[in-house]
Image (tube, rainbow, N blue to C red):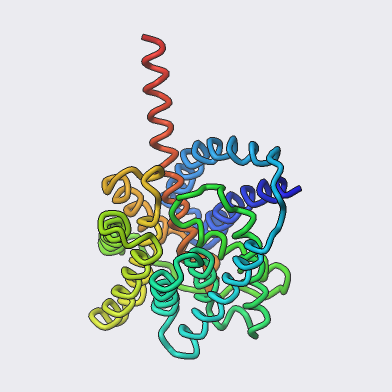
Amino acid sequence: MYGLVRGCGYVALLLIPAALLGSALLTPRGAQTGIVGLEVGIVLVGGIAAVAERERALERLHVDAAGFDRADAVDVLAVVAGTMLAYGLSVHAGLGPVLGSAFVGLVVGLGADDLDGPVYCGSFVGMTSPTLFPSAEYLVGAGFVAGLAYVATRGTFAGMGGKLGTVALFGCATAVVLTGVDYGVGGALQWDSARVVVPVAVVGAVSTVVLSVRLELGAVVGSALVGVVAGAAFPTLLPGLGETLAAVAFCASFVGMSATGRLRDEAHVALAGCLCGLVFIAVTPAFVGAGGKLGTVAFVSCVTVTGTRELYEMLIARSEREE
């Protein structure tokens, strides 16, 4: 039974990115050739990684797991706690979603690293706009669903950057469906903004992996530090565009959280960061106001780059066999 829950978690990690990409296509600018081409390429190549992960997910269906235990319950509550802490800093303390989430991640990463994963995941739910959910009960519900999803997806796509945000968006999207609220309406970024967005994304992703792996600070602390610096610096130095660039850098920091088994070195991280910037622009009008959207963008980018590498290695191996 518990293995079946894990299987459902795998499906959820596929449905949420698909829903985000599909929603972007349904916007007025979604039929543009560039967006369609980008998303079709992502689906085709990212599907390679998804199929490879499916084999591991299916294996878990036959594993005799102990079931939901005390540790799982603690993780669910930690996600809810991270949700409310980040939301309080973002909205009530006026720090904004990037700084609110990043501060929570930094504190928990330095002081309680045994819970840094679920709390940081919850902080992404807490990035939700107050215009999306009319009361705290909605937010708690989204955090609780995200907590259950966090437990259900444990081990699936392990080490893939952006996974925590995807789990957070699953919680928010589920709450939206159950309550019938509407997503916000936001302006779309123009493609010429890629000249700024993509370099910021690459730097954000590579900086995170340097902090987390090379300096051995850990993935959560590395990402949170990038978020704190970007969230404080960009809005101050670049009024108007600064908040968007802070979100881009924080989004890309989730790419840099990837394990080396997923993105092997800084070159792969930079490539995923570049794609992250492009996907960020493409999906700007979709799921407006929902927490976890930035992480889902990073997840899509990491899965796509991983799938590209696996496809390349598969073709090379096939070529060698034929020789």
- Residue 48 location (% of width, % of height): 50, 36
Q: Residue furthest left?
A: 237
Q: Residue furthest top?
A: 323
Q: Is residue 23 above or below residue 272?
A: below
**Residue located at (49% from left, 39% from top):** 49
Q: Is residue 121 left or right of residue 58?
A: left
Q: Is residue 184 visible?
A: yes
Kindly indicate the quadrant of the structure image that contains residue 78. Answer: bottom right
Q: Is residue 201 visible?
A: no
Kindly indicate the quadrant of the structure image that contains residue 214. Answer: bottom left
Q: Residue furthest right?
A: 1
**Residue located at (61% from left, 41% from top):** 57
Q: Is residue 259 left or right of residue 170?
A: left
**Residue located at (31% from left, 68% from top):** 226
Q: 249 or 239: which is nearer to us? A: 249
**Residue located at (62% from left, 78% from top):** 139
What is the quadrant of the C terminus in the image?
top left
Q: Is residue 214 above or below residue 61?
A: below
- Residue 76 location (% of width, % of height): 63, 67
- Residue 215 location (% of width, % of height): 26, 59
Q: 79 or 93: which is nearer to us? A: 79
Q: Is residue 306 above or below residue 82?
A: above
Q: Is residue 35 above or below residue 192?
A: above
Count of residue discs: 0
